[in-house]
Image: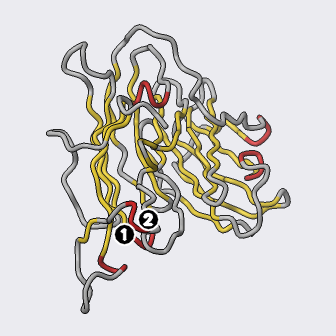
Amino acid sequence: MLDTDIISIKEHINSPKKEPANIIKLNLIAPTNDEEPSLLVHGYYNINVDLAGHYSQKLPSPIYIVAVARSSGHVHIQNLVANDDIPARYLGNKGKPTVVKHGPTGPSTKGISHSTFFNVDLKRHLGLGSAEDTYDVFAFLEDIISKVASADKRQEQGDQQDSILYNITAPINHMHPISSASNQLAFKQTYEGTVLSGSAASNRISLIVFSISQQQPAWTTLFVKDHPGIQFDIPLKTFLPDVKPDEKVIAFAMVDGKRLAPIYLNFP
């Protein structure tokens, strides 16, 4: 269980507005004084019970939060846990979801969802470095994905914690600098099996791959010097060596603070 000073469940003046299921929303707030956390997320989710597992005793994935450092492309990723998983894994009488709609004969799974606000101290939760930087942040629960929120983090005292997870170094032969490129991302089948293929109209791109069934994230940052573009083909098993048939995999790409459209794969 994490310190509730890092993640708390409460509404705040800077919290996002409520919306119907299924949604995750983030507001990323820089401090107004030295007493406030250097980078604070005010978040909101509303997840229907079929996804959240209420009444069916199916335990869902927790929400994951991703922060990408604009200066380096380094990725920080971790799930959100405070007193219970977010979204809370209520079973039986341990908790009651919020009824947002009634079915024809009363509450039904089609019209019930669980929603709450949450606040996250990103520096402490993700182990962000001490240096000044701009961070691009989003959260996801399977295919429910927030928009990207960005904010500047101040220079501050303290060492970076060991919380950057699953940094995968892509083989250099799978990356090529090119003079002209567009931002693209796709899963393709080649002689090497399934590959994550794409290009970036920049000299840096951050790639994040996530296995839903294994709850395993992996990431790498591709960088080329003195070139305006990158082209790459990276075998999926470089990221997820133990990926198995019928696993659902999600991939994200961040380029210069912008996220390409996420892509999905049911691994063959």
The circle on residue 32 is none
The residue closer to the viewer here, 257 or 147, is 147
Horizontal relation, residue 53 to residue 167: left or right: left
Q: Distance of mark 2 from mark 1, alpha carbons?
A: 6 Å
Which residue has dot 2 on it?
52
94 on left or right of 240: left
Residue 257 higher or lower than 197, as above or below: above
Question: Does dot 1 land on a helix, a strand or a loop?
Answer: strand
Q: Which residue is mark 1?
A: 48
Asked if residue 95 is positioned above or below residue 151 in the image, the reply reads: below
Residues 57 and 115: in front is 57
Q: Amino acid at mark 2?
A: Ala
Identity of the residue furthest to the right in this view? 191
Element assignment for label 2: helix
Mark 2 touches mark 1? (CB < 8 Å): yes
Q: Residue at x 33, y 41 (%)?
A: 149
* Residue in view at x 84 percent, y 56 percent: 192
Circle 2 packing at 10 Å, graded few (<14), some (14-19), many (20+), is many
Residue depicted at 29% across the width and 36% down the height: 28
The residue closer to the viewer here, 198 or 62, is 62
At 59% from the left and 30% from the top, the residue drawn is: 227
- Image quadrant where residue 132 sits: top left
* Side of 62 where 249 appears, left or right: right
User: Residue 11: horizontal and vertical position, in percent?
Assistant: 20, 44
Amino acid beneath label 1: Asn
Rendered location of residue 35, percent (x, y): 24, 15
Residue 3, percent from left and from top = 42, 30
